[in-house]
Image (tube, helix red, strand yellow):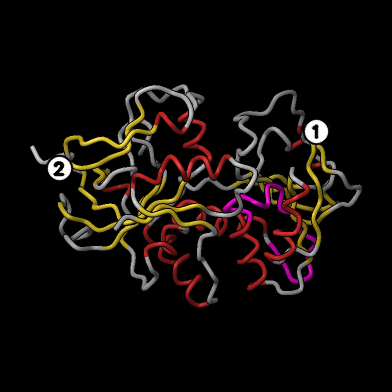
């Protein structure tokens, strides 16, 4: 049996539970193909799983819900030939079966998306989950030139990516970003936000109303976001950075203002065409997809988790394998 290096978590806990191990390399099976991992992003949901907050996940497990890489063994030579560059997101990778924190990952063909791109490994790593989530959310928000937009959870990878996309598409839009940490306001202004609002204990410290709100904290703050939506405005609930998965005591009749709309985006709604369309859009609009922080090698995964949990974290964090 051929072996590979992987980050294995045997029990929930802190970043120290992410151990570099030598394990068996997965063997190909019908309907699945083997990918050599080139890079992957670090996501908040992986931190939740590491802490034991994902009830469906059992240990030991190799985490990682997204990756970029190359097909090395295939069960679908027509769609996924050897050497094909791919990205993969969501499904149950890193949850029901071992994920991308490894040199190789075995994935269902339905969860592998062939791509044509000249982006470098690090830049492409910032795209699968984060780029696609931002892109899909903005489509569903029905944006327009000059709109007054709030991004709640702005310092996250999706928040910064959404900012970059909106700035290219709608230069006159007025963009406000939120943060729980006042010391991050300068970074948000530098990234391109027009205003910054503090988000303290789930409450926005402003009386302003917005025509569009990208809600990345999720159910934990959704009711408060609706208090700040303008008549006829749209709230897009996409992220779950607040660590709460469902709504409590939410009455749509009372909590959604008259004329306002609630929409959402789920990155699991994905096809080859949508993924390639996003990449073509990024290239056409020359959107800067460089991640905010790059770590190198599997051994850096615990440090990447520590960074993402720290007060210094900002934007997308990725791992690039040599």
| Residue 295 x/y as whole percent | 43, 53
Question: Can the viewer see residue 29 in this picture?
Answer: no
Mark 1 neighbour density, 10 Å: few (under 14) some (14–19) many (20 or more): few
Q: Is residue 38 above or below residue 152?
A: below
Q: Identify the residue at image location x=33%, y=69%.
A: 116
Magenta region: which residues? 143-159
Q: Residue furthest right?
A: 207
Please tell me which residue is depicted at 84% across the width and 46% down the height of the picture: 228
Where does the image place residue 10, in percent across and percent down from the top left? 34, 24
- Residue 76 on image: x %, y %: 17, 53
Residue shown at 82% from the left, 37% from the top: 203
Distance in Å between CA atoms under marks 1 and 2: 51 Å
Callout 2: few (<14), some (14-19), or many (20+) C-alpha neighbours within 10 Å?
Answer: some
- Residue 137 in sight from this viewpoint: yes
Q: Earlier in the sequence, mark 1 or mark 2?
A: 2
Q: Is residue 22 left or right of residue 171?
A: left
Q: Tell me the tag on residue 15.
A: none
Q: Does the segment drawn in magenta span residue 147?
A: yes
> Would you identify the image quadrant in which residue 211 lies?
bottom right
- Could you tell me which quadrant the N terminus lies in? top left
Q: Nearer the viewer, residue 265 or 67?
A: 67
Residue under label 2, please give it. Answer: 28
Where is residue 12? Give x, y as percent: 44, 23
Q: Quadrant of the C terminus?
A: bottom left
**Circle 1: element type:** helix
What is the tally of numbered marks visible in this picture?
2
Residue under the point 81% across and 34% down: 255
- 25 shown above or below 71: above
> Residue under circle 1?
253
């Amino acid at each position: 049996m051929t072996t590979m290096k992987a980050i294995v978590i045997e029990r929930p806990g802190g970043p120290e539970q992410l151990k570099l191990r030598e394990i068996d390399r997965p063997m190909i099976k019908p309907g699945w193909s083997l990918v050599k991992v080139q890079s992957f992003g670090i996501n908040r949901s992986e931190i939740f799983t590491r802490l034991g907050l994902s009830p469906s996940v059992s240990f030991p497990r190799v985490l990682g819900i997204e990756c970029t890489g190359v097909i090395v063994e295939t069960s679908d030579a027509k769609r996924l030939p050897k050497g094909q560059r791919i990205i993969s997101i969501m499904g149950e990778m890193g949850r029901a079966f071992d994920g991308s924190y490894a040199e190789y990952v075995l994935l269902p063909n339905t969860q592998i998306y062939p791509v044509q791109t000249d982006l470098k490994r690090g830049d492409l790593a910032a795209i699968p989950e984060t780029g696609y989530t931002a892109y899909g959310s903005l489509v569903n928000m029905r944006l327009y030139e000059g709109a007054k937009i709030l991004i709640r959870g702005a310092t996250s990878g999706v928040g910064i990516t959404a900012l970059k996309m909106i700035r290219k598409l709608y230069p006159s839009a007025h963009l406000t970003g939120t943060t729980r940490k006042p010391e991050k306001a300068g970074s948000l202004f530098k990234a391109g936000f027009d205003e910054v609002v503090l988000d303290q204990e789930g409450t926005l410290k402003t009386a302003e109303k917005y025509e569009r709100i990208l809600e990345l904290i999720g159910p934990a703050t959704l009711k408060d976001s609706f208090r700040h939506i303008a008549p006829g405005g749209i709230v897009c609930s996409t992220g779950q950075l607040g660590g709460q998965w469902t709504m409590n005591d939410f009455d749509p009749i009372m909590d959604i203002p008259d004329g306002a709309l609630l929409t959402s985006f789920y990155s699991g709604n994905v096809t080859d065409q949508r993924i390639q369309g996003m990449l073509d859009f990024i290239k056409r609009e020359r959107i800067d997809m460089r991640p905010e922080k790059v770590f190198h090698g599997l051994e850096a995964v615990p440090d990447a988790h520590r960074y993402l949990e720290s007060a210094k974290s900002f934007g997308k964090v990725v791992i690039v394998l040599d």
